[in-house]
Amino acid sequence: MPSRERLSAAEARRVAVAAQGFGGPPATGPVGGRALRRVLQRIGLVQIDSVNVLVRAHYLPLFSRLGAYDTVVLDRAAYYAPRRLFEYWGHEASLLPVELYPLLRWRMERASADAWGGMQRISRERPELLERLVEDVRERGPISASELAADEAPRRTGPWWDWSDIKRALEFLFWSGRLTSARRRRFERLYDLPERVLPRAVLALPTPSAEDAQRELLRIAARALGVAAERDLRDYFRLPTTEARARTAELVEAGELLPVSVEGWRTPGYLHPAANVPRRVDACALVGPFDSLVWNRDRTERIFDFRYRIEIYVPKPKRVHGYYVLPFLLGERLVARVDLKADREAGVLRVQAAHGEPAAPPETAGALREQLHALASWLGLGGVEVVRSGDLARALS
């Protein structure tokens, strides 16, 4: 157990990288369910995102930490019995271990107050639509929003609701826990009843108070982050600010979070009591844009001195580093970034831009090249093609 009051910037980086599961011994043999559970036990959840220019976001964290694996391992855990993961609003849309389901019931109970505006409006104005959809899903689920909307259209008799109303209503029912995701088809969520999807033993677990649940979610976040500011801890599961601050103070008082001063931080830090402070970290990984190592941009800059923004929605002429950019982790530092696209028609991984950080070591290009070829192989692509854009592109190619 660490007994220190101050961390250097380098120590904080190593703590953060190690806590996220990087730098461990490489996997030997096929990666199976046990390795998946080990990663999820460390990081707590994986974020889902619809962008598929490279590969779906939730597949990348395991590749970054374990290397090549069969994505069926994750699909089986998330969408087939015995269900190990469930889909819900964790950080953003996320896959989480089913054991965490009771810890998020307080969020489900607050759907009427906390869900986004369109969902709240539908829940207030069209309660009959909610009940109708629950019954439709009960009779026909798993089923998608588009299927429900298409089947309802011929039954319209005068003023009714449109597709967007159905989608908002289903999303409200998902937020409130009355429906869940059975699986996805071409990334479209198929809704079903929780009792037909989640393990009976999980549904039977008692519901903790909101305070107890939030404390446990903060414990998970603290373990996954290693060392963190208070806002890092609450952002991990998107906890309400006032409540998260109160729960953090309670964990500090109980000795479950250790206050530390971190070199260069303008905010107090908190160290998990079981955090490892390694002397070095031998990590080498491409990190997805929605990976929990970097999803909090303020923390990424504070820990790694690495300013990172997703430029997907930035007009192309205004992009600095590219459309779908992955940071490259080498040792304890983020030393480069590459804009990647899986060109499945041509069978190549395209490096559309490659930029090194000012302090990137000489071995960066060689190590990055190896990781790019490993990624291409995992994606079933025949090779890597480097476009001459960015200061690292020539060395890569």
Image: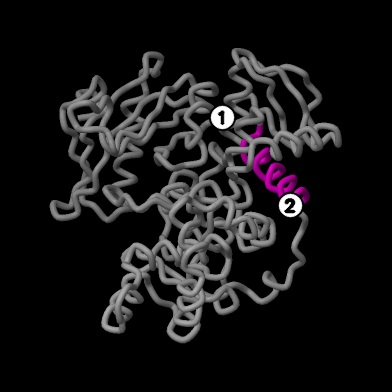
Q: Indicate left or right for 14 with 141 as reference.
A: right
Identify the element where label 2 is drawn. Answer: helix
- Asked whether the beta carbons under mark 1 and mark 2 sit within 8 Å of each other, the answer is no
What residue is drawn where x is 22% and y is 26%? 318
What residue is drawn where x is 28% and y is 27%? 321
Position of residue 334 relative to residue 372, above or below, is above
Instruction: Please provide the residue range marked out in magenta.
Output: 211-226
What residue is drawn where x is 69% and y is 36%? 242
- Looking at this view, is 373 or 275 the one in front? 275
Name which residue type carries label 2: Ala
Q: Give the residue at mark 1.
A: 281
1 or 2: tag closer to the N-terminus = 2
Q: Is residue 217 magenta?
A: yes
Residue 203 locus on image (x, y percent): 67, 71
Dividing the picture into quadrants, the one containing residue 281 is top right
Residue 100 locus on image (x, y percent): 65, 58
